[in-house]
Image (spheres, grey):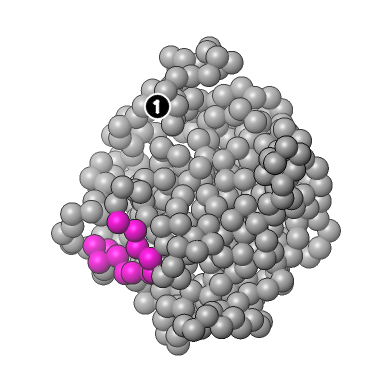
Amino acid sequence: NWDLISRKEVPKQQAAFRNLGQNLWGPHRYGCLSDVQVSSVVSGPCAAFSLLITTEGKLWSWGRNDKGQLGHGDTKRLDAPKLIEGLSDQVIVSAACGRNHTLALTDDGTAYSFGENKLGQLGQGSQTDAVLSPATISYNGQPLVKVACGAEFSMVVDCKGNLYSFGCPDYGQLGHNSDGKYIARSNRIEFDCELIPRRVALFIEKSKDGQIMPVPNVVVRDVACGANHTLVLDSQKRVFSWGFGGYGRLGHTEQKDEMVPRLVKLFDFPGRGASLIYTGYQCSFAVNEMGGLYFWGVTNTSRECTMYPKIVQDLCGWKVRSLASEKFVVFGYGDNKAKSSTSAQEVKTLDGVYVEQVAMGYSHSLVIARQDTEQEQDKLKKLPEYNPRTV
């Protein structure tokens, strides 16, 4: 039930949905998607809503919609995926979800945004409560190739490997050497938000004795955002992190906020670079060139935190193809090899199902399963079908 995620009761304005949508304790097929070919699924560690992109490049959305983050021109919650009409004439290649906002990227390198915009996280040059339908971000540079969303901020990467950020600068998460805080009327702290994409100009490394050196020639290949921190992977397989430093999520062995992208030392050695990066709400992951999965930060604040990247022993020997994480859970899918473990558990209900991709949002998981052969189709038909009631 989307409205009950992290809430004790359904808000008054959503009362009509009180008994709609049930909690699903195992994998279900969405009945309404039986004829839809899905190429990717998207959610985020703070997002109580989801997106899917079809093989034809159409974007669908469903879930919580208090701020219009579903892009349908209203704030009605949706229990089943629905096509975003405002983008139906575009070919969407990727998308990202913040807490209450969405970014979508087209095949010609244009980014659209919608949802909450109180802190300028839509990059449209204004601060408004909500934008209910897709509109382009205020940007006229090189075509964009990547989009990512933190809780209340956003990142985009252009085809030349330049990184741009916008939204809330708290904790230095925008990478512009400031947390944007200032004291407004009656001693209230407010933020000087970035309302349009601003290029992240400086990347640094810090030596053991605290000396700061700029790192030249950073060409960004990928970007991933947690609630209040960001990871970047560059063309030299280096990893940089910045933003909120609590619980070791930045991997610099100290719980200090970083205001500009800082090199994560572990991956800065020949043959030990990173090939993939992922973020959870307050944690980070990287897969290195050898296929080993590294983790730092915390998945549950009542447990010990990991202050620098450590290999995930339980998944040694597995090739990680896709990984997702939300506030308390991590969900990955690799090539199956025998393993014993007390923490990483195999999802037995999907035994024998070939998973193309996984995604996680706040309290929910999404999986794309292959159905190329009759055997694979039979396996999927055995999973229960979910057809939520609608208002």
Instruction: Name the residue at the bottom extreme.
Output: 270
Q: Where is residue 196 in the image (x, y as percent from the top left)?
A: 78, 53
Q: Where is residue 361 in the image (x, y as percent from the top left)?
A: 46, 42
Task: Please report the residue visible at 67 percent of the width from the left and 36 percent of the height from the top.
Answer: 115
Instruction: Name above or below for residue 378 compared with residue 322.
Output: above
| Kind of residue sitting beneath label 1 | Tyr
Task: Please report the residue visible at 53 percent of the width from the left and 12 percent of the height from the top.
Answer: 16
What residue did someone put label 1 on?
386
Label 1: few (<14), some (14–19) or many (≥20) C-alpha neighbours in 10 Å = some
Q: Is residue 147 left or right of residue 299?
A: right
Q: Specify the segment rendered in magenta.
A: 304-315
Instruction: Name above or below for residue 107 compared with residue 199.
Output: above
* Numbered disc 1: secondary structure: strand
- Quadrant position of the C terminus in the picture: top right
Instruction: Name above or below for residue 267 compared with residue 11.
Output: below
Query: For residue 190, what is the image quadrant?
Result: top right
Q: In this view of the protein, which residue sits in the foreground, 317 or 378?
A: 317
Query: For residue 27, what is the image quadrant?
Result: top left
Q: In this view of the protein, which residue sits in the foreground, 209 or 122?
A: 209
Query: For residue 304, what is the image quadrant?
Result: bottom left
Inspect this view and state whether residue 129 appears.
yes
Inspect this view and state whether residue 137 appears.
no
Instruction: Name above or below for residue 169 compared with residue 117.
Output: below
Per the image, is 311 magenta? Answer: yes
Per the image, is 9 magenta? Answer: no
Q: In this view of the protein, which residue sits in the foreground, 315 or 295?
A: 295
Numbered disc total: 1
Q: Is residue 191 left or right of residue 230?
A: right
Q: Position of residue 208 (x, y in %)?
A: 47, 83
Q: Where is residue 230 in the image (x, y as percent from the top left)?
A: 55, 60
